[in-house]
Structures are given as C-alpha cells and as structure tokens.
Amino acid sequence: MLVALELLGLAAFAASGAFAAVWARLDVFGVIIIGLTTALGGGIIRDVLLGINPPTTLRTWPYLAVSAATALLVFAFHPVLARLRRAVLLADAVGLGLFAPAGTAIALNAGAPVYTACLIGMTTGIGGGAMRDLLLREIPLVLRREIYAIAALAGAVLVAVGHQLRWPPIPVTVGAAAVVVTIRLVSLWRKWNAPVARGTGRPAGE
Amino acid sequence: MLVALELLGLAAFAASGAFAAVWARLDVFGVIIIGLTTALGGGIIRDVLLGINPPTTLRTWPYLAVSAATALLVFAFHPVLARLRRAVLLADAVGLGLFAPAGTAIALNAGAPVYTACLIGMTTGIGGGAMRDLLLREIPLVLRREIYAIAALAGAVLVAVGHQLRWPPIPVTVGAAAVVVTIRLVSLWRKWNAPVARGTGRPAGE
Amino acid sequence: MLVALELLGLAAFAASGAFAAVWARLDVFGVIIIGLTTALGGGIIRDVLLGINPPTTLRTWPYLAVSAATALLVFAFHPVLARLRRAVLLADAVGLGLFAPAGTAIALNAGAPVYTACLIGMTTGIGGGAMRDLLLREIPLVLRREIYAIAALAGAVLVAVGHQLRWPPIPVTVGAAAVVVTIRLVSLWRKWNAPVARGTGRPAGE
C-alpha cells in the first residue's frame, strides 16, 4: 500500500507540474520534462546531497513511467482534469506527507546528523515544486504563501525525534505522514498563511 | 577529429550563451560566466548525477579555454558575429549530437540502467542551454518550442539500444550523432514545432 | 578569530538574502529559506562538485543557527536594519573574502587541478547570492554589474598560485582574503563597474 501511495503522490506532483507547464504554453515535451522534474526533483536533490549516484528516482522505472504518463494525460485532457483540482491538491498533500518523512529517514540512514536530515527531508518534499517554479520563471510558490514547507519540516522533525528516541521507524513514518497531510489540508481548508513582514518594502535606491 | 568536433560543439554552446548574455546587457565577466555555464553545464549536471567528482568538464582545461575564449570573442565582436547565426546553429546541432550520445555512453559505463542513461544523456545535451536561460530569467527555450530535447533523446535512445544489443560502440555513437544533427537541422529548416496543448490556458483563480 | 569572521560572513550573506526576500514579500518561512540558501548555497555547490556528502555547510549546526537567526532578525526588524546597509556590505565583502579562498583551498586538498580549484573557489563565493537571485526571479546581480565575481576569482587564483609555489597556506589564505576584501570595497567606493558590450542589443527576429 505504501508503494501505491508513493506512486499516487508522484502522479500528483507530476500533474501539478504538467498543469503549470500547459498554462505556460510549453510544448508536449516541455510538459513531460516539467512533469518529471516536479515529481522526481526533490528525490534527485536529496540523492545528490547524500551522494547516492545515480539518484534513486532516476533509477526506478515505475516512478518515471507513472510521472511521464500523468504529464501526458494532463497535456491531452487538461480542460477536463482541471476540474479535479481538489483531488490533485489532496494527492499532492499525500505526496508531501510521504516524501518529506521518507527523505528524512533516508538521510538519517546515510549517516547525516539529525538537523541535516530534517533539512534534506524538507527539501525532498518541496524541491520538485521549487524546480517546477524556477523553470517556469516563477518565484517558488512554497516560499510565497500557504503552509507547505513548514508542514514538510514538521514531518521531518517528527521522524528525526523518533530516530533519536529509538522509536520503531515504520509507525513513526506513518504518523509523520499523517501529521504533514493534516497540517497541509487544514491550512488549505482554513486558508492559513504564514506572516509576511510589515513595512513598505524595498527602500529607494536598492 | 572527434576532439575537434567536441571543441567546436563547446564553442557553439559558449557562443549561444555569450550572445544571450550580451543581449541581456551583462558585463564582460557575466558574459564569460554564462558562456562557460552554457558550454559546460550539461556535463556538470551529468557528472553530479553520476558521482564523478569534480566534474570532467571542469577538469579538462581545453574545454575551459575554448569556452572562455569564444565568450570573449562574442563579447568583443558580437555585432559582426551575429551575422554568423546559421553557422552557430549548425555548430550547436553538432554539439548536441555529440554531447547527448556521449553522455548516454558515459552513464551506461558508470552502471546506470538504460532508461536512466537515456535521461542523463538527454540532460547532458540540453542542460547547459537550460542553465543559460534560467540564469537570464527566461523559461528554457528547449521547453518552449522547436525540436531540441527530442533530438537529444533520440540520439540517447539509439546509443542505449546499441548498448543492449552489444553493437560496437564507436559506430553507434557516430550514427546517433548523425541522427541528432539531422533531426535538429531538418526541424530548423522545415520550422517543425512540437504541439502545444489546446485550450484557453490557466483557469481563473489559479 | 577565523571562526568568528566566518560566522560574520555567513550572517552577512544570510542578511542579504533575507532583505531581498522581505522586499519580494515572501512569508517568514520563505525569508528563512532564502537566508539559509544565500548563506550556505556556495558551500553546498562546492561540496556537491567535490563529492563531499552531505555538504559540510549542512552538517555544521552553528552555520545553520547563525544564518537562520540572522534571517529571522531581518524579518522582524528590517526597517531599522536597512539603515545598516554599509555594515552589511562590509560584512558581505568579508564573507566573500573568506569563502572564495577557503573554497579554493578545500578543492585543492580534494585533489582538483589548480584551474578547477579556482573556478570552484569563485563559485563558493558567488554561488549563494546567485541562488538567492534565481529563487527570487532576478538575473543574478553578480553577473550584471559591480566587481564581485572577479574579486572572488582574484582571491582564488592567489591561493592556487601559493599552493603551486608551496607557500605556507595560512598566510596565503589570509592575504587572499585581504585582496578580495580590498578589491570589493574599493570598487564599491569608487563605483567601478565591469564593461558592458557596445552595440544595439538583440537583433530583430531573435
């Protein structure tokens, strides 16, 4: 079931990339490449930072197949699929909930210190979306609004705490995933946003 | 002769970066850095993904010298050199034809699975241009129009198929390069473009 | 004292990132992430290129703590702190002066050829700021104006020359840092800029 959830999360990430690419008027290959990058980018960054070569996400063909097929479906049927926006947001939250805790656990197993593992886990969750926005010339959405990075970080910290206290890893990871999904969905539902700095912005002459 | 073609391809990549940087009004050091990044970026990404440290392209001084010298020439003589646009496009196609198949072969030799090697080979070909566009705040051209990534992927797949069937590597790589160059030049000549999704773009509220 | 200067440089880099993020209206987590990226990004790129996993800057908790705390201070008190612009520029020059020579020395110790070490050292100095500008959708400032990359490169070359001539490493690194800081501050004071290409810019039809 974990594998099925993982593929669901990858498909949601790929769909979010493909929608953004279609709206930016990219061609079909651009849509597939952005879909793959969004789905696999977080894991690629994680593995590059940990020295796992070549990255696991590039070596696992079901990941590639599911991501590319999802991007292609979005390319072909995006006017219909755009109505599934809520389903995509839910699946995206599941993906974030799986990838951030799993990235933290992988980093801990690779011998990283706990705070390093938390940062790498958070990056695993948010890195694909950040690469999508970079390639499409947007300031990454995750940095601008909504509770997203902090949900990923909460899941990462929970896994790291469980690792320090020698709790059994499987229930901890599942619990961390549940925490991430809950924070993410409640913040979407209640329209929570993180605070922005007060003040009048960039001073003259900058 | 392969080495001469490789340096020609690097020079073409460096020239495309330097022209874009001059047009974006960067200073002379910015032009050189963008030229180097465009020429060497694909190989750097390939080696980072494969764990080849430090990247070969940064360790081979003729690559650095040819790329930097080309960027400096473009900086100094860009109004004259802009007339050579067709020659630069031809040399760029040669570069793509060499780097995508060679990147695939390097990834296969490093033990990557075939589909991973194809993706890494394609990235070797298109990565430098994508980094150029990212640094200059453009959506990467390769994702937007023209047959470019798919030409690189075709060459990569050919090398991978040859590797699986144990064909002799040198003729396969040369043949793959010829295929890439042909696809690229014919698509330029016939103004082929990959399809863009139908529809009215981003729905309201996104 | 070197450690104190290093943390001062990191704080200056984090502050420059946090100011830019506040002005771009990012939320508090975005400001912290951009602050961390600006401070630690150069070292992360260096370690990824050299195969040092996970990157040292992500493994050293005082680096993380000082960078995150600085970003948080900027978020909270940016209208007051913006008056310290000169102090931040001075500290930023100190950071550049430390990180570019130190990055070169680390690359040489990892066995990189001298010209590779110079490029990696320069990248260590300018990489964090370039990542800041990329994430905020700006053409990296370091490529556009001011004497910045060349100051970093001068320090890197000095360390490499000293290494080749077997000069004692500590005084060489200190001297290189002094050269970087001097070039950077004099160019700021005298408003030196690197030359931009002559001509009318991008030709029609590009």
Image (spheres, coloured by chain):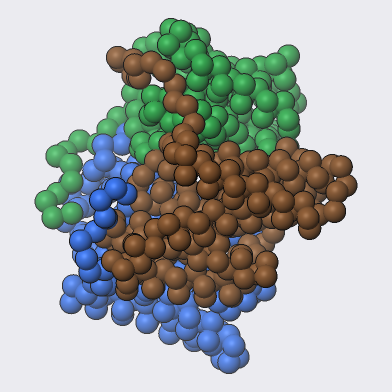
Chain colours: A blue, B green, C brown
Where is residue A162, by image quadrant?
bottom right
* Residue beneath the point at 61% across and 53% down: C97
**A140 horizontally vs B121: left or right:** left
Q: Is residue B171 visible?
A: yes
Q: Residue C150: image x %, image y %?
A: 58, 38
Quadrant that contains the C terminus of chain B: bottom left
Please tell me whether residue A41 is drawn above or below residue C61 in the rendered image. Answer: above
**Residue that extends furthest to the right in the rendered view of this protein:** C166
Please tell me which residue is depicted at 38% across the width and 73% down the height of the picture: C73
Asked which quadrant contains residue C77, the reply is: bottom left
Question: In front: C149, or A140?
Answer: C149
Q: Vertical placement of A129 versus B177: above or below?
A: below
- Left or right? Give the position of A45 relative to B140: right
Quarter in which the N terminus of chain B is drawn: top right
Q: Identify which residue, B203 or A1, lies in the foreground.
A: B203
Counting from the top left corner in percent of width and height, residue A25 is at 26, 37
**B9 or C88, which lies in front?**
C88
Measured from the top left, where is residue A163 in percent x and y?
Answer: 58, 85
Whether residue A59 appears in this view of the structure is: no
Residue A147 placed where, x, y %?
30, 71
